[in-house]
Image (cartoon, grey):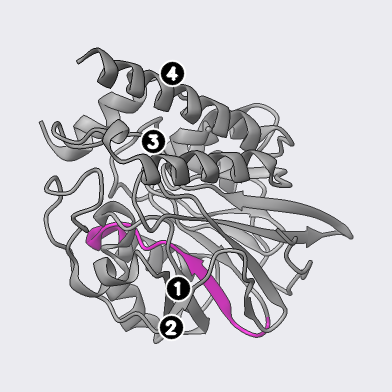
Amino acid sequence: MTLYNIFRHFCMVSTLSCVAVAATCYATASPTIANSAASDWVNSCTDWDTWDKAGPPFHIYGNSYYVGTCGISAILITSADGHILIDGATEAGAEVIAANIQTLGFAITDIKLLLQSHEHFDHVAGLARLQQLSGARLLASAAAAPVLTSGVVAAADPQAGMHQPFPAVKVDGLVTAGEVVTLGKLSLMPVATPGHTPGALSWQWTSCEAEQCQVLVYADSLSPVSSDSYRFSEHLSYLQAYRAGLDKLAALDCQILLTPHPSASNMRTRLQSNGLTDTDGCKVYAAAVTQRLDKRLTKEKAQ
C-alpha cells in the first residue's frame, strides 16, 4: 500500500471531522472569478482525492484563492505589492499549482513569498520548482528549515523513515511564531502547531470584499500519524507542545478554516452546502484532533 493510500485510509476511518493579531484587511484589484469555479472544483474532485490530480482553482474570499490539487491544498493571497503562496504540494503538484495561478490571471513571477505548513513531501516537495518559476523568497520555521534545505525528514519527526527525500529548496529567512509576516499591505500571523511534524505552522490572515472582512486560518494537519515504532507518550515535551498548539488553534479568531488536505476540514462538503464560513471551524477541528490524540495515547498505554 502506498504512503498516500495509508494516509487516506487512516483519515477516512478516524474520528476527525476530516476539518494573535488579526492580519491587515486588504482587498486587491484582481481578475473576476466566475461564481461557478468552486462548483467546478466540487464536480472535478472527490473526498480524499489523489494528491496530484488537477482540479480548477477557485476564489475563496477577498484576495484569497485555492490553487492546489484535488487532494493537496495551496493558498494564494494576492496584492498589488506581490503575492504570497502557502505550500507547494508534491513535485508533480507544483505544475498544477503554477497552471492554476495562471488560469486565475495572475503572474507566477508576482509571487514574492513562499510559506510552509508542515515539512512533508506532499506539501513542500514542489516548493523548489515554484521558487524556480517565481523567484520568490521562502520563509520557514526554525525546525522546518533544515528539512527543506536537505529534503530529508528530521529524526525527531514522528514519521521519520517513512518518506523518500524530496528536492531541496533554498530557505531565505526564518519565521518566528507570533511575529507577523508582511508583504506590502499583506500581513499573515504564523502560529506554531507542532505535532504532525516538529516545524509545523498554521497561518491566520484577513481578507476583505465589498467592505466585509473574514479571518481565514490555514490550520496544519496536526493528525497523530507516525511510524510503527514512535510513541508520543515517550516524548513528553513534544506532546506538551502538541497540545499547546491545539489550544492556540482552538482559541483563534477563525471564520474560514482551510487545511493542507482539503478533506481534513470537509472542504468539498462545505462548498456543497452553506459555504466555507464557520466561526466554530477551528474550535471543532482542534477538538477532533485532540480526541484522536487522546485515543492514540490510550492505545500506547495499553501496548
In magenta stretch: residue 22: no
Residue 164: which disc? Answer: none
Q: Secondary structure at mark 2?
A: strand
State how far apart marks 3 and 2 are (Cα).
Answer: 28 Å
In magenta stretch: residue 84: yes
State how far apart marks 2 and 4 are (Cα).
Answer: 38 Å
- Is 60 drawn above or below residue 128 in the view shown? above
Residue holding disc 4: 15
- Between circles 3 and 2, the one closer to the viewer is 3
Name the foreground residue: 199 vs 118.
199
Quadrant containing the N terminus in the rendered view: top left
Q: Is residue 285 left or right of residue 174?
A: right
The residue located at (53%, 36%) in the rendering is 267
Task: Please report whichever mark, 1 or 2, sits nearer to the chain's N-terminal start.
Answer: 1
The residue located at (33%, 36%) in the rendering is 49
State how far apart marks 3 and 1 are (Cα).
Answer: 23 Å
Residue holding disc 3: 223
Amino acid of disc 1: Leu
Task: Please report whichever mark, 3 or 2, sits nearer to the chain's N-terminal start.
Answer: 2
Amino acid of disc 2: Arg
Tell whether label 2 touches label 3 (CB within 8 Å). Answer: no
- Is 242 drawn above or below residue 18 in the view shown? below
Residue holding disc 2: 137
Task: Please report whichever mark, 4 or 3, sits nearer to the chain's N-terminal start.
Answer: 4
Amino acid of disc 4: Thr
The residue located at (17%, 49%) in the rendering is 160
Quarter assignment of residue 187: bottom right
Q: Furthest residue to the right?
A: 211
Highlighted magenta segment, given as a residue range: 80-93
- Between circles 1 and 4, the one closer to the viewer is 4
Quadrant containing the C terminus in the rendered view: top left
Amino acid of disc 3: Ser
